[in-house]
Amino acid sequence: MKRPALLLWTLALFLAVDSLQAKELVIVTSFPKELFENYKKAFEARYPGINVVINSKQTNAGVTYLRETKNRPEADIFWVSAPDAFQTLKNDGLLEKYAPPKEVMAKIPAKIGNFPVHDADGNYFGFAISGYGLMWNKNYLQGHKLPAPKEWTDLTNPRYHGHLVISAPSRSGTTHLTIETILQAYGWEKGWTLLLNAGGNMGAITERSFGVPEAVISGQYGIGVVIDFFGLSAIASGQPVDFVYPSLTSVVPASVAIVKGAPNMENAKTFVNYLLTEPGQMQLFSPDIARLPVMPDLYAKGPANYPNPFKMKMGGVDFNDQLSSGRRDIVNSLYDHIITFRHNELKEAWATIYRAEETAAKGKGPNVAQARSLIAEARKLAAQVPIDDKKAGDKEIAAAFRGKSGLKAQLETEWENAARSNYAKAKELADKAASLAR
Amino acid sequence: MAEIEAAPALRLREQIDWLQGAVMAALLVLLFVFILYPIMRVLWVALADENGQLTLIHFRNFFFRPLFREALWNSLSNGLWVVLFGSLIGVPLAYVIARYEFRGKILLQTLATLPLAIPPFVGAVAFQQVLGRSGTVNLLLMRWFDASIPFVDGLAGVVLVQTLHYFPFIMLNTAVSLSNIDLSLEEMAESMGCHGLRLFRRVTLPLMLPGFIAGSLLTFIRVIDDLGTPLMLNQKNLLAPQAYLRITTIGIDDVDGYVICVVLVVLSLVSLLVARKYLSLAEYATVQGGGAIAKPIHGKKLTLVFLFSGLALALCLLPHIGILLLSFAKVWSFSVLPTAFTLDHYTEIFFRVPHFIRNTLLYTGLAAGFDVILGAAIAFLLLRSQLWGRNLLDALASLPLAIPGVVIAVGYIRVFHGWDFPGAGAPLTSTWFILVIVYAVRRLPYTVRASYAALQQVHVSLEESAQNLGANRLRTFFRVTMLFISGGLVAGGLIAFITSCVELSSTIMLVPRIELGPISYGIYVYMQSALGRGAGAALGVVAILLVAVGTYLTHRLFGGRAGSAFRV
């Protein structure tokens, strides 16, 4: 047993030498390789002597990592898309406040649409803008003879049943914002009607954000709900896909933050400044990154026909950030318990409804009218949200979702049971309607 | 005279027992620090109430939630189905491997073990590209018959993929039992007029049952713990994905996730104990005896064997073939085969970022080395010592089989991050050595089992005669025992190596920086971008090749007994 011990100490010495490098900048990021590699190269060239260290982690693994290492931070910069991650870290007090120089901030507007670009308390800073939209595989749509989508409401088209894909909002901060956009654009009840109907059309609900573009690129599913750069960078890399921003969309910044107690504080500040000034911003235009800068003046220097969020019509979605973050945990859990985890039942219910509608459309019997009213009832049941927006915005309930309270389990069970019985009933009614109309 | 002779012998024994005791204590401390304590730090959440007091209320709640009951039921029934279908593939292959001698047998063994190690992410993509709803097979079916088969839909899809993934456990274990059976038993039965099916049912089956049961239970444990397959097929109403989704969702501290982890651990431990109990009862009878000799086969029988194994392997290796195609593909979208090919992905991973491959070799090599040393020491103490604490040692060393990777990883960060590791000048979790440790810990059960099986074959009298000739016990251990079990040790080490090559769940939590990541981490990084699929697949191919070489060497060294390492 002596030899391994000796080996261990030799290794330990080895590691000691390894970790003695000075002048580092440690970045925790969930961004794709193309993005962080480009930035690493450019930043190191501009600031010789600073060695950029990338720690690539999924957003949630990154949050866990920062939490677990808070007594002794290793990372300097946290750099991801999902706004919820920053809010969570801010609430936990894991982000460092910073005020970038005035001349840097002057060129960036305070808001994009209604969404503040930077955190009001200076905990994190928007460096790029992302919009949400629909991405589709051209070969797939052609093969299945399907039209290309344009609007969120297209997701409820019966022809798309089983051809759509989305990631669960609880797993993807960007999907959560898409869901919120829809809820705020159409209102709580109508929004959920759309989401539940679209949910019934989904072929799959993935667990990773990137699972959606992956499924669309490989042609497993036809249309995916994605953040813009997934679509734009896939087009740039020659995949047979296309992307559209629906008219009712909102754009949201992707941010960067300095970690509380960052070991290389000065370098971290330099990096944030770099990202927010022209050299850092210009890099976003490169085709394999394909993101939208936060400096409006820069678009004149960008590629032709590049989407400009400062000129896009925001379609009247008055995005309320406070509302969104206040009920985030509830909306996510609700989506999971009535859509993600009940996906089989929901999908089946809508398939039955569509079949009944087809039969009713062709049917001529005396009972067609009755069948139609049954179908209408089934549609209502299969798109019913078990909680109203007042309750969803309740502060006490929101607190229950963060603690160990039994209220959360109770609500989740209620929602699940309501979903089960609604979808089963909807299917039963639709089946009855189909046999009546025949 | 008698007194004078007895005295040194007695002294020797006392001294050696002290040495054994010291090793035992050191091992127990090591396993406690790196296995039990980190796991407890994480799972304690499930057992504590708001004031930090012990409570079982969370477990009561678990059974009151329909979603969790559904998940529990789905996991259990999945496990049973996979065992059933896995046996249909695994048992015939095991019989062929253990009983027949033919050209290409090692190739067959190697290929049939490969499914155990499918690289993460790319394996999923490849599977979808081949068997998915717009995969090669279904596109052809649509073109020819205007119909498609939902191979990977729903829970049935999960069962299919897991069957193809885990059947080697059943195959390897059954093969070990089959090659342990004394051929004379069957010959005796035959000479007494027992033939064919009756012979199989009355003699062969009962004798191979221990290995089969062990393999089945191991498969069962792996299936209920399996996270990758359900997630890749977007099935979330199973225990492992429910736990994972709850533990890793941003911003919510969900007790239920940890409760499910504890439920998973309990289920695995129960299966483990049942398998142990059964094996210790049943295998006693077959420890003695010369073992079976594989018979050469020719002609029709050989053709039949080739036909069956070819068909089974073609099915099981579909993802591997898919990964190979993907690694050369520039565009593969809604088409039977890729429509544009390139070699760029290989240039990328060999010349631009070779560190992923280098790191994998370094970490898994070191981890396998530690596992061999620890495995040999633990097996020796289990079989040859009478010390107190052997059962505890055994239990601790087997525990990693039942613990999800995420739990160990979070535990390590919790335990090791706060303080500088002596000599390293930094916390253990900021160095690459944490990856070596986590691989060594997670694969330790395999080397312990391999060494245990090998040591069982060495008769104590060999060691005793070495000591009679004047060697002390330490010298005996290194010069005699180690020599005899070296084949088993190397095989166990290789298995630790090949299974670590594709480990993802703890890797992704623990990699301190991108330059220190191994292949599985590299695949993750590539799979986060639209352009990275090909390069990720190329890394996957390298991982498969490493695993294939490791497996081939294992079978070369260990022959039909390669499965001993996958014992429980």
Image: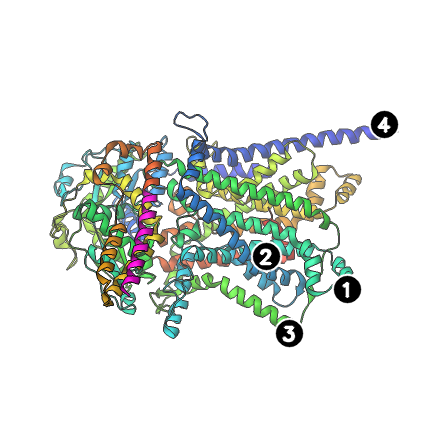
Q: Name the residue under label 2.
A: B171
Residue B193, disc: 1
* Label pair 4/1, CB-CB below 8 angstroms: no
- The quadrant holding residue B112 is bottom right
Lower sequence index among marks 4 and 2: 4
Q: Report how far apart the C-alphas of labels 4 and 2 lie in the structure.
A: 55 Å
Viewer-proximal residue, B559 or B388? B388
Lower sequence index among marks 1 and 3: 1
The amino acid pointed to by label 4 is: Glu
Closer to the eye: label 3 or 4:
3
Q: Mark 3 points at which residue?
A: B300
Q: Is mark 1 on a helix, strand or loop?
A: loop
In the picture, the quarter occupied by the C terminus of chain A is bottom left
The amino acid pointed to by label 1 is: Gly
- Residue A298: x and y in percent read 14, 51
Q: Mark 4 points at which residue?
A: B3
